[in-house]
Structure formats: C-alpha cells, structure tokens
Amino acid sequence: MAKKDFDSLTKKERKELAKKLRQEEGSSDRLRSNMTKIVIFAIAVVIVGAVIFVFTRPVSEKALAGQEIPIQGREHIAQGSTNHAPYNSNPPTSGPHWPTPADCKIYSEEVPDEAAIHSLEHGAVWITYKDKNDKELAANLAKLVGQNPTKVLLSPRVKNDDPIALASWGRLLVLEEFDEQQISDFLANNKNNSPEPLAACGSG
C-alpha cells in the first residue's frame, strides 16, 4: 500500500489493517513452521525405512559366504549349563545357548559355545583357531579383527576340526590357512544376518 493511501485511512481502518497484516504474518510463520516439520518428518521416515530395509530384507538378497547350516533354534538354557542336544556343526552356528552373550572382543582363552552362540544370534561373527600356540596365526587374525572391530569375537577353540573357522548365524566357513580376503568377505557379508541384528553384541 502506498503511503498516500495509508495516510487517507481513518484511525479505525489503520488498526484493522494492522491487525490483518499481523494475522497474515502469523499465518505465514505457521506455514513455514509446518513445512519445516513436514520436511523433518519426511527425512526421518526415509532414514527409518532405510534402516528397516537393511536389517529385514531377505537373507537371499545378500551375498552370504560360507556353508549354510540348518538352524537348531534359539532356546535359552541355564547360564553355565552344557546339558543340551548336540550341535550340528563344529563350531556351532545356532541352537541352545546361555541368556548372557559373550562380549565381542579378542580372547586369549576359549569362549564357551553356549555364550558365543548368543552373540551370533545378535549378528556377530565368531572367528576361532584350533592351535592357541600358533602365535603368528593369532596375531594375523587379531590384526584383521582390529580392522573390523564391530560385532566380531576371536578366540582359540581346540575342538575345531580345522585350523580356522568362522561362524555366523546359520553359516560356517572353515579354512586350512589364513586367508585375509575370504575372512574379510565373510565378515562383510555375514554380520547381522541373524534374528536380532540390532541387539548388542555382548552383555555390556
């Protein structure tokens, strides 16, 4: 409105005009606020959708490594108990396990199968080696785990049939010697292919 037109208004008309302008300004602010909320909500939906897709898409869509092992269930048994049916692979990849999972870290001593299986259920990969006195192999594996620290546990396991074994939920890869590429592929492709991929790896 031109200054001349504004000056010609009565006092009452000026008040009404000012009120109208404030209302229009308020409507504009509310519109901007609503648009901002809509944009934030849309971004949140996209992020949540992406996370759900990654963790719930069928396993068959992923390039899994190793041999598929039939799932033996997810039964919890008493902490410390070893009274259960035999596992169907060595090391095991599923089946009865303790309520408390093993922490994902590098161990110098053996980890009970029943604790490690619970970690596998949470999406971890368990790397084991048969000869705990093979310091070179242990060092090579530890170095690789250090480069892939999330959801990985490493331990010696004398009951292994092979020098090296990698287990994830329902998958097993055995190796005669250290193979960085195969191990890295197993870690990359098999983590979180499990019933509880969003759960913490261990008890902490």
Image (cartoon, grey):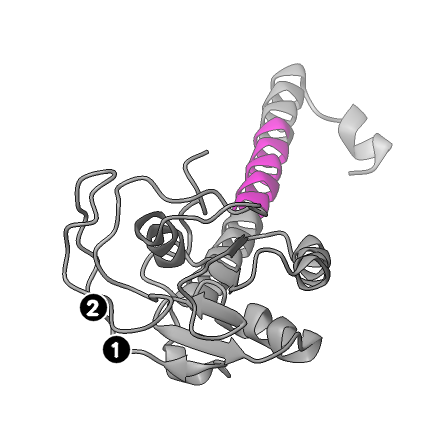
Label 1 secondary element: loop
> Is label 1 in contact with label 2 (beta carbons under 8 Å)?
yes
Q: Amino acid at mark 2?
A: Gln
Q: Considering depth in this image, is 170 or 179 the residue closer to the camera?
A: 179
Q: Quadrant of the N terminus?
A: top right
Residue, x 65% and y 61% (percent of image)? 134
> What residue is pinned by disc 1?
70
Magenta region: 22-37
- What residue lies at 36% left-to-right and 64% top-to-bottom? 194
Q: Residue furthest top?
A: 11
Q: Position of residue 116 (x, y in %)?
A: 39, 52
- Residue projecting furthest to the right: 3
Q: Is residue 10 left or right of residue 62?
A: right
Inspect the magenta stretch and tell me whether residue 43 lies in it.
Answer: no
Magenta: main secondary structure equals helix
Near mark 2 (Cα within 10 A), the count class, few <14, some 14-19 or many ≥20, is some
x, y percent for residue 155? 53, 53
Task: State the separation of the CA atoms marked 1 and 2.
Answer: 6 Å
Residue type, label 1 = Pro
Residue 31 falls within the magenta-colored stretch: yes
